[in-house]
Image: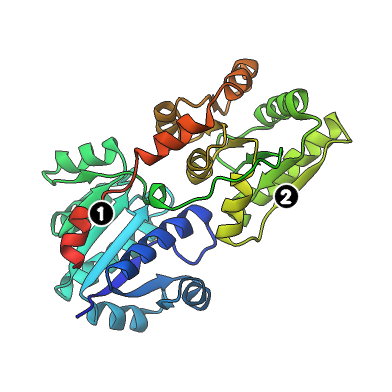
Amino acid sequence: MAKKVVLSGYYGYDNFGDEAILAVLIDHLKQIGADVTVLSHNPKKTSYNYQVKAVKNFNLLSVIFALKNCDVLISGGGSLLQDVTSLKSLLYYSFIIWLAQIFNKQVIIFAQGIGPLQRDISKNIVANLISKANLVTVRDIKSCELLQSWGIDAEIVSDPVFSMDLPQSESSGAVGIQLREFKTMNDAFLQRLAESVVKEFAHKKIELYVFQNALDLEISKRFVKMLKKLYPEIETEIVRSLSQNDIIIRISRLEYMIAMRFHAVLVAIKTGVPTIAINYDAKVAKLAYEAFLPLLTISADEDFDTAFIKLKTLNSTDLIDFARSKTFDWREFDKILR
């Protein structure tokens, strides 16, 4: 008999990375015959896109019904259990785990980044809930060490999106740029980046990738203006409002990529596109170091020339081979689900 599984995460908000994780997770669950329900901000769209049941994530009665009638809750992936974004967010995702445990359901913490946790109450809540989970998998060593300091065993796993079957396509000759707003982002860095892009790629098409409208769109528009001011004839396009699959196909055809978001860098690597990573988060820096990518921090005094020289020496085959070495390990996961 198929196990009934509820998925809880940052789903239904049109965030490319979270939706990519959801796609991988649903695909695997369908392969092993699970009956899937997603707690989503936009259940109608989630249900249509993935052909699964979905309920409104903040509809308490629907959430209670889904959890009461499931066998397993999967919480993740992503950075759900942290209080930097907001305490409210942490309390919501913790409440979902707590409800599942109250109903005596099995709980999987799936490829999460745990923390940062700034408040003692946050640490107590997360430690108590995770200690009772049936399987805990995290995506980085810091999360694992934090849990170990609480006496909780956790397995470090690769990002699930590494398991996606992505295309390698003929290059369109375009250069992709993926930016997002961040607290340390500044116009001095953007200006230096724009100058380097015009210097190196003035006669190529520049595609600005918007993974989440709220954080990516306005900064992409600002960057286009900087490029046009430096070189009015430069060809640009803001790529937005495409399906996840269409975005992946567009990235796979790029000649080069310059990206901030973790999953923009990851997809470029998987499809063999030479990439400069922009370090705004430790997970991006870690991926860049592992894949031997040039890395820029959000600073205006870096050696951009060296980064672009290294970009052009990257080998597509080496990037694809690296991505294949990071395939997600489903074995412990499947022991609970089968």
- Label placed on residue 330: 1
* Horizontal arrangement in the rendering, residue 194 relative to residue 97 (left or right): right
* Horizontal arrangement in the rendering, residue 81 relative to residue 85 (left or right): left
Rendering coords of residue 82 (x, y %): 34, 50
Quarter in which the C terminus is drawn: bottom left
Rendering coords of residue 124 (x, y %): 20, 52
Residue under the image location 55 percent in, 38 percent down? 260
3D distance between C-alphas at marks 2 and 1: 36 Å
Q: Which colour scheme appears in the figure?
A: rainbow
* Label 2 vs 1, first from the N-terminus: 2
Q: Which residue is mark 2?
A: 238
**Residue type, mark 2 in image:** Ile
**Label 1: which secondary element:** loop
Rendering coords of residue 72 (x, y %): 22, 70
Residue lying farthest to the right in this orientation: 233
Residue under the image location 46 percent in, 30 percent down? 318
Label 1 environment density (alpha carbons within 10 Å; few <14, some 14–19, many ≥20) = few
Residue 211 visible in the current orientation: no
Residue 42 visible in the current orientation: yes
